[in-house]
Amino acid sequence: MKSSKGHLNTAADISSVIKSKMKGRVAIVGIGNILRGDDGLGPKLIEILKDKHPAMPAGLFDCGTAPENYIFPILATSCDTVVLIDAADLGMRPGDARVFDLDQISNVSFSTHNPSPRLFTDLLKTGKDNMNIFIVSVQPKTTALGNSISKEVLRGLEILADVFSDALVNS
């Protein structure tokens, strides 16, 4: 069920959308600054996935604030789908997630890193033009320097970890 603002508010909604978008080999890319509270949610999700499933059938990349440094390692996995996980101020409840196609991200305010995720995805597509790429953005509560990840966002990440685990293990 989508809320009136278009975000996904149940695990079943998120799971359905993510499963429908993942094709072939998958790379999951966590983006964000671990020193800025909830902005570090992308790397935290990668950590959770690695802890839960050390042999998960996906390339898991903690790219921090410099995803462009991981273009060649991501392409080396021969993945067909790249899923970017990042914090974005979407005006939702902290921990809520929304899935974006690339053509939808021009008006989204991603937290603290440059260059934009769009430049990163354009560079990935230069290496493999038919690559399927989408973004899962999670609403942060705080991105203040020195804060840890909020309880609300951690709950949302646990749901996403379960969704990705289920989607990848059962695909």
Image (cartoon, rainbow, N blue to C red):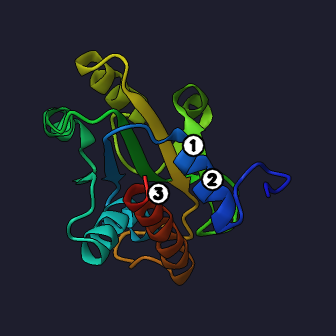
Picture disc at residue 77 = none
For disc 3, the neighbor class at 10 Å (few under 14, some 14 to 19, many from 20) is some
Amino acid at pointer 3: Ala
The answer to the question of whether label 2 and label 1 lie on touching residues, with beta carbons closer than 8 A, is yes
Q: Kindly identify the residue that appears in the image at 27 percent across and 20 percent down.
A: 128
Mark sitting earlier along the chain (3/2) = 2
The residue closer to the viewer here, 54 or 133, is 54
Within 10 angstroms of label 2, few (less than 14), some, or many (20 or more) residues? few
SS label for mark 3: helix
Residue ID for mark 2: 16
Q: Which amino acid does label 2 sit on?
A: Ser
User: Between 42 and 130, which is closer to the camera in this rendering?
Assistant: 130
Secondary structure at badge 1 equals: helix
Q: In the figure, 137 relative to 161: above or below?
A: above
Circle 3 sits on which residue? 167
The residue sitting at 33% across, 16% down in the picture is: 129
Vertical comparison of 9 with 66: above or below: below
Residues 97 and 13: in front is: 13
Q: In this view, does 128 lie to the left or right of 85?
A: left
Front-lying residue, 147 or 27:
27
16 versus 140 height, above or below: above
Residue tagged 1: 20
Q: Could you classify mark 1 by the number of other residues whose Cα lies within 10 Å: few (under 14), some (14-19), or many (20 or more)?
A: few
Q: Is mark 2 on a helix, strand or loop?
A: helix
Left or right of 143 in this view: 17: right
